[in-house]
């Protein structure tokens, strides 16, 4: 990205084509790291005890020095996705309002998830071995509906046709929290974020009081502290919170996550603090490097498909890897599995994900809402802390408004994220779970 800088007092994120390069790059790399780690750790090592020069080199350069030998370098991807959600989805919710935001999120998440669950069910019916969680038998209609609704992650014994879909439970809890608190977010951002953190604390305190389903809900709530950290960084970067509150809320969110890790709520979920800390550092590095980054088509394409890559790789690549293990050289087998995954991802993106995103935009447009070009979200919301001042100015204002200097009036009506491209305010890219 040429030109532009992150400056105070009205922070601006200067982008190319309305997209933040650091988020596109981060999402693209994060999705690829998940695929690499699952093939390396869950297929090659756990199933067949295999190794390769590439995996050995990655271990030597990254995995071992970062103390991530137990679950691989892909551990960094999930917290990065959550941080992006907190940073990006909060202003989108404030722009859309509750009903429009709810519709938008449902059509962002569930069509692709439904497609992947159906593909995974078909693979299991045909005798394939996708990446699953728990004991998965021949899936019936009830099993498919439970997987599509994500209820299966709140039931014991746990089983999932799409093993990586557990992160979507956390995303949906975060979205629901935003919906409930949205009126307060518009009027009193510090209080709304304090209530978020208090709610997480209450759920963690009571995690063992209301049975297995509530315990599983509680461990997912523990991970909501990560998108809240992204939310704190958004509030800090856009100067919606003073530095003291930013430090306080960030510290509380971090301590709640650390506490949840020490509570050992469920043996299947082990919150890991080191990957989150590294992800936060990388996110902040990307945020402040944004003025110096340039968009490239390759990572824009990967970023757009990161949700489908994340959900589909275990459903497509793993059955092929198991099927061809004893018949093909490892390098050729992996290439075939990755090529097949890329083909199905592209098919799913063109037939399911992109149309569902376009439908989500159409359904979530309110009267008078601006129309964004295809493939982009509408612009970011006005400052909830200055909503009344904006309304007063629009209505003619009062003596106090007329007495304001031009700079003061500008600060009172500054959008959350001014993203400048050719003189226009453009939207920030919207991840799902992904966002």
Image (spheres, rainbow, N blue to C red):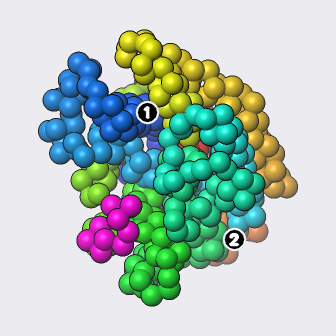
At 69% from the left and 25% from the top, the residue drawn is 347
The residue pinned by badge 1 equals 35
Answer whether residue 264 is magenta in the image: yes
Which mark is nearer the camera, 2 or 1?
A: 1
Q: Nearer the viewer, residue 154 or 424?
A: 154
The mark that comes first in sequence, 2 or 1, is 1
At 74% from the left and 68% from the top, the residue drawn is 396
Residue 71 in sight from this viewpoint: yes
Q: Is residue 319 above or below residue 430?
A: above
Instruction: State which quarter of the image contains the N terminus.
Output: top left
* 212 sits to left or right of 52: right
Mark 2 residue element: helix
Q: How many residues crowd mark 1 within 10 Å: few (<14), some (14–19), many (20+)?
A: some
At 16% from the left and 38% from the top, the residue drawn is 64
Q: Nearer the viewer, residue 366 or 291?
A: 366
Q: Which of 328 and 406 is in front in this view?
A: 328
Answer whether residue 178 is magenta in the image: no
What is the x, y in percent for residue 131?
50, 41
Q: Give the range drawn in magenta.
A: 261-270
Q: Give the alpha-carbon distance from disc 2 to disc 1, as whole Å.
A: 52 Å
Q: How many labels does the image show?
A: 2
Q: Is residue 132 above or below residue 390?
A: above
The residue pinned by badge 2 equals 392
Quadrant assignment, res 181? bottom right
At 46% from the left and 66% from the top, the residue drawn is 220
Q: How many residues crowd mark 2 within 10 Å: few (<14), some (14–19), many (20+)?
A: few
What is the x, y in percent for residue 39?
39, 31
Mark 1 residue element: helix
* 6 sits to left or right of 312: left
């Amino acid at each position: 990205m040429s030109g532009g800088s992150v400056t105070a007092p009205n922070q601006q994120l200067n982008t190319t084509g309305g997209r933040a390069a650091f988020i596109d790059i981060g999402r693209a790399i994060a999705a690829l790291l998940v695929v690499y780690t699952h093939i390396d750790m869950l297929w090659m090592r756990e199933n067949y005890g295999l190794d390769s020069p590439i995996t050995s080199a990655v271990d030597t350069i990254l995995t071992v020095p970062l103390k991530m030998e137990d679950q691989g370098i892909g551990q960094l991807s999930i917290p990065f996705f959550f941080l992006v959600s907190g940073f990006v989805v909060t202003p989108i919710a404030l722009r859309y309002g509750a009903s429009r935001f709810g519709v938008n999120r449902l059509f962002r998440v569930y069509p692709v998830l439904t497609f992947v669950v159906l593909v995974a069910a078909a693979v299991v019916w045909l005798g394939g071995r996708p990446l699953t969680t728990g004991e998965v038998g021949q899936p019936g209609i009830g099993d498919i509906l439970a997987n599509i609704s994500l209820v299966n992650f709140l039931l014991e014994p746990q089983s999932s046709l799409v093993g990586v879909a557990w992160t979507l439970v956390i995303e949906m809890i975060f979205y629901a929290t935003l919906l409930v608190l949205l009126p307060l977010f518009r009027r009193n951002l510090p209080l709304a974020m304090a209530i978020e953190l208090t709610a997480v604390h209450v759920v963690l305190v009571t995690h063992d009081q209301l049975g297995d389903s509530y315990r599983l809900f509680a461990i997912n709530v523990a991970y909501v502290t990560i998108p809240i950290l992204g939310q704190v960084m958004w509030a800090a970067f856009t100067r919606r919170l003073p530095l003291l509150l930013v430090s306080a809320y960030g510290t509380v969110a971090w301590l709640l996550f650390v506490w949840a890790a020490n509570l050992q709520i469920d043996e299947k979920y082990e919150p890991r603090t080191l990957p989150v800390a590294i992800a936060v550092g990388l996110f902040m590095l990307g945020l402040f490097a944004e003025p110096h980054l340039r968009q490239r088509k390759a990572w824009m394409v990967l970023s757009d498909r990161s949700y489908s890559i994340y959900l589909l790789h275990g459903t497509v690549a793993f059955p092929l890897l198991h099927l061809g293990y004893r018949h093909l050289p490892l390098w050729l087998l992996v290439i075939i599995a990755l090529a097949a995954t890329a083909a199905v991802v592209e098919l799913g993106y063109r037939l399911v994900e992109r149309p569902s995103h376009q439908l989500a935009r159409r359904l979530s447009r309110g009267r008078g809402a601006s129309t964004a070009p295809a493939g982009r979200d509408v612009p970011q919301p006005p400052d909830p802390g200055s909503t009344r001042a904006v309304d007063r100015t629009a209505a003619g204002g009062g003596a106090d408004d007329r007495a304001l200097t031009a700079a003061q009036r500008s600060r009172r009506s500054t959008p959350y994220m001014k993203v400048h491209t050719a003189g226009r305010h453009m939207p920030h890219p919207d991840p799902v779970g992904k966002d």
